[in-house]
Structures are given as structure tokens and as C-alpha cells.
Amino acid sequence: MIDPIRSLTFGTGLKFQEFTITYSDLTTAGLTQAINLVTLPAGSGFILGVRLKHSVQFAAPVATSLTVSVGSSAAGAAGYASAWQILSVAVADTTFQMTTQFNRGTAAAEIVQATFTAIGGNVNTMTAGSVTIGVLYGVPTDPTSW
């Protein structure tokens, strides 16, 4: 699990956390790697939105594509944020992906993950890159009231 770089709590049940993942966090000698971000508690968690923003363009000697998506095993790898290209897209103030959605978590505890998918080379062959993922989520104080 990646530690958040920023964590804000609004009242008793709304949280925003940001996680920065760099190329050195991509250690899998394969085309995909999932990195755990946050755990939604059983029966009560929901996602309000996800923001993806890279601050250093990813680079690799042989890979032709690298995308990042946000989801879970229950919602699918892109259940909360669809795949976003971070290898061939230049960094700019206006280059980001933001979702506005209200997604209910499952009855079981759910781990929200960032999934990196490479084409043409393994994810651990990246030589540069940094992406920050912000997750806005809610955890009601009394899930039985839903």
C-alpha cells in the first residue's frame, strides 16, 4: 500500500487522499501491476471521484504505452477511473483526468487500486515518471442507516 501524500477529512465521513506513484514503485516484471491505495470498509464505503495528474512524464526504452486506471477487484481495474495514457503525454497544467461519479462499494471490504498497464515492455522498465492520484471517498458513520 502506498502512503498518502495528503489526507483531508471533512466531518466524520468524507475523505480526500492523494497518492504519488513514481516509476521506481513499478516493480513487476510483467505488463500490469496493481498498487493498493485505500481500503473501503465492508458495506459502507463509496467513491465520489478520482483525479489523475502526472508531474513527470513516464519514459521507457522499449514500452510504447503505459496507462493507469483506478478500480478494485469488485469494480474492475477501471471501475472508478478509466485507463489514462501517461507514457506519451506531455506534462502540462491542463493535462489530467478527473471523474465525477458516485460509486457504491461492495458489501465486503474493498481495496481501491491503481493499475498500471504497459504495451511493448514490462512496467518495471520505466526510467522516469510520477503520477499523483487523488481519491475522494465517503465512509458513513452508521452504514446500517443506508
Image: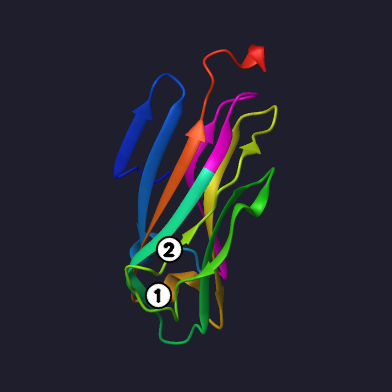
- Tell me residue 74's x, y (percent): 69, 43
**Quadrant of the rendered image containing residue 96:** bottom left
Q: Residues in magenta?
A: 30-48
Going by the numbered disc 2, the residue's amino acid type is: Leu
Nearer-the-camera pick, 75 or 63: 75
Label for residue 26?
2
In the image, is residue 94 part of the stretch drawn in magenta? Answer: no
Does 100 sit left or right of 87 as displayed?
A: right
- Tell me residue 93's x, y (percent): 32, 68
Label for residue 126?
1
- Tell me residue 58's x, y (percent): 38, 74
Question: Of helix, strand and loop, which mostly describes the magenta segment?
Answer: strand
Do residues under tags 1 and 2 come within 8 Å of each other at their CB atoms?
A: yes
Q: Residue at (38%, 59%) from the top-left corner?
A: 25
Q: In this view, does 138 lie above or below 32?
A: above
Q: Residue at (65%, 24%) from the top-left corner?
A: 43
Mark 1 falls on what kind of element?
Answer: loop
Screen quadrant of the N terminus = top left
- Tell me residue 105's x, y (percent): 64, 34
Marks 1 and 2, the one that precedes in the sequence: 2
Nearer-the-camera pick, 50 or 61: 50
Going by the numbered disc 1, the residue's amino acid type is: Met
Colour treatment of the image: rainbow
Q: Is residue 72 above or below residue 7?
A: below
